[in-house]
Image: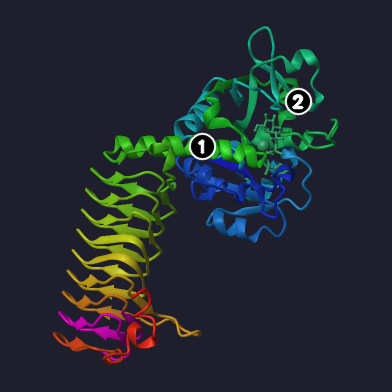
């Protein structure tokens, strides 16, 4: 049995935020959830250490149990808070930092597997710019002697390129004892998890480390580092989408979410944003400047340019959604079209129906939302206002400019506009203007 303690209580002062640091999102979800995704593949149990009142965090990490660190006295102190939840556990425990979200399953696996050769294993990296990371001080035999935090390091120690990525792993009975012995005797007055190394050595324990790429191990302490992690992850997601058979004509301008699913022969034009929960089936096209969230595009559908597809929408096989069209919680049947300047919300649109330019579903009466149903093969004339709840029957037609307040039977034509009246000789000439210039 293996367990992980995920430290997530830090406020991340440098984020200058009212939100816990690990709740900031990359690719559309909190960084702690990225880490948990990798962790659950390697560890049988996960315990999260949160700060007091971090209810949204507790919810985000559910069903993993949460230990609360009332006073944020440092990483070793935080790890200690998990002890009651691990009482009696005698397997290996890894301590993971919630602000290191990009680590992958294979890397975590290497960390725990290296326990075969040492009592305490650390995760290390050689970042291009070691900045303020803790440094690994090795002995002559290549074992880790101690970690020195940047703030407490001498100039020579700051010159070391091998940095502490923050994760470590040891048998819990020993690790918990080392944690209890950590003292807050450093420049910041904090209980450093990193001090466990020197305590382990004093105990005669063998220490080792495994290395991984900086890209996976970067810690996020500021908005600038958050953006760097976002860029790193976007590059991974775009590559994965292209390797899966999607064409991204200008990959760097496309923003993907962690769970975006693009099928084969999907084409995504420049400047498209995928918020979480989007599935695009094979052969569908998302044209430039579109924004999609929690929706599905079925095979061969085409949306955009400038389309907004909001949560709960399902664009049917071969259906078209054109420029400046917004769909919200709307199911568009196969081959249906809404090509220009429309708002269609809380609606079902039958197969092959045509929604004319400027159509609006008036779904909100100021208090509640109401549904609009449009039957298969219906033709909704341009600039129709559909005052919901309302139903337009199959193959029915609404005249352009209609305000439809009553259901329209199948196959009927609805005219819901003022009748036009033509007054002869009342044009411009009758206003003494038509003769000007004569
Ligand atoms: C830590 C390491 C440093 C390493 C770096 C890698 C220590 C003392 N230093 O520094 O050697 O190079 O990570 O990214 O461990 N947290 C709590 N409670 C606390 C303090 C922190 O839960 O009281 C959590 C934070 O939410 C964060 C994680 O622990 O997720 C790491 O803390 P942070 O303050 O970011 O440590 P660093 O200064 O980055
Ligand atoms: Ca950090």
Residue 168 located within the stretch drawn in magenta: no
Residue picked out by circle 1: 231
How far apart in space, not on screen, are marks 2 and 1 (Cα)?
A: 26 Å
Q: Is mark 2 within 8 Å of ligand 1?
A: yes
Is residue 403 among the parts visible in the rendering? Answer: yes
Image quadrant where residue 96 sits: top right
x and y percentages locating residue 76 in the rendered image: 73, 38
Which segment did they paint magenta? 384-407
Q: Secondary structure at mark 1?
A: helix
Residue 33 placed where, x, y %?
Answer: 52, 48
Q: Earlier in the sequence, mark 2 or mark 1?
A: 2
In the rendered image, which residue does mark 2 sit on?
A: 150
Q: Note whether residue 91 is visible.
A: no
Tell me if residue 303 comes above or below residue 426 in the rendering: above
Residue 115 vs residue 251, the one in the foreground: 251
Q: Residue at x 65, y 16 (%)?
A: 161
Residue 35, above or below 385:
above
Depicted 346 relative to depicted 147: above or below = below
Q: Quadrant of the C terminus?
A: bottom left
């Amino acid at each position: 049995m293996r367990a992980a303690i995920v430290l997530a209580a830090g406020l991340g002062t440098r984020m200058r935020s009212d939100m816990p640091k690990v709740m900031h999102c990359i690719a559309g979800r909190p960084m702690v959830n990225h880490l948990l995704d990798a962790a659950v593949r390697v560890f049988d149990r996960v315990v999260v250490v949160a700060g007091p009142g971090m209810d949204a965090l507790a919810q985000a990490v559910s069903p993993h149990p949460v230990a609360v660190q009332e006073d944020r006295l440092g990483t070793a102190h935080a790890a200690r808070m998990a002890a009651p939840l691990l009482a009696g556990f005698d397997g290996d425990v890894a301590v993971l930092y919630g602000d290191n979200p990009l680590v992958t399953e294979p890397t975590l696996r290497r960390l725990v597997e290296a326990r075969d050769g040492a009592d305490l294993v650390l995760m290390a990296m050689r970042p291009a710019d070691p900045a303020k990371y803790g440094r690994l001080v090795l002995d002559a035999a290549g074992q880790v002697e101690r970690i020195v935090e940047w703030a407490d390091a001498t100039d020579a120690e700051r010159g070391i390129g091998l940095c502490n990525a923050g994760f470590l792993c040891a048998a819990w009975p020993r690790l918990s004892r080392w944690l209890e012995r950590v003292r807050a005797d450093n420049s910041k007055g904090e209980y450093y998890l990193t001090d466990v190394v020197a305590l382990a050595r004093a105990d005669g324990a063998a220490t080792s480390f495994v290395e991984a790429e900086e890209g996976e191990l970067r810690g996020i302490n500021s908005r600038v580092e958050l953006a760097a992690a976002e860029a790193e992850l976007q590059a991974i997601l775009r590559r994965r989408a292209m390797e899966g058979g999607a064409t991204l004509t200008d990959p760097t301008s496309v923003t993907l979410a962690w769970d975006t699913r693009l099928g084969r022969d999907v084409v995504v034009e420049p400047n498209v944003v995928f918020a979480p929960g989007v599935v695009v089936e094979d052969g569908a096209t998302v044209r430039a400047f579109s924004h999609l969230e929690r929706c599905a595009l079925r095979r061969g559908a085409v949306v955009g340019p400038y389309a907004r597809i909001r949560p709960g929408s399902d664009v049917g096989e071969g259906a078209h959604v054109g420029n400046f069209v917004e769909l919200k919680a709307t199911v568009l049947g196969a081959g249906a079209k809404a090509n220009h300047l429309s708002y269609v919300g809380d609606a079902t649109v039958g197969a092959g129906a045509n929604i004319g330019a400027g159509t609006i579903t008036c779904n909100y009466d100021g208090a509640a939302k109401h549904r609009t149903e449009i039957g298969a093969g219906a033709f909704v004339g341009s600039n129709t206002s559909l005052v919901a709840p309302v139903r337009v029957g199959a193959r029915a037609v609404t005249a352009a400019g209609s305000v439809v307040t009553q259901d329209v039977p199948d196959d009927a034509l609805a005219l819901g506009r003022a009748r036009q009246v033509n007054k002869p000789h009342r044009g411009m000439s009758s206003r003494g203007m038509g003769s000007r210039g004569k």
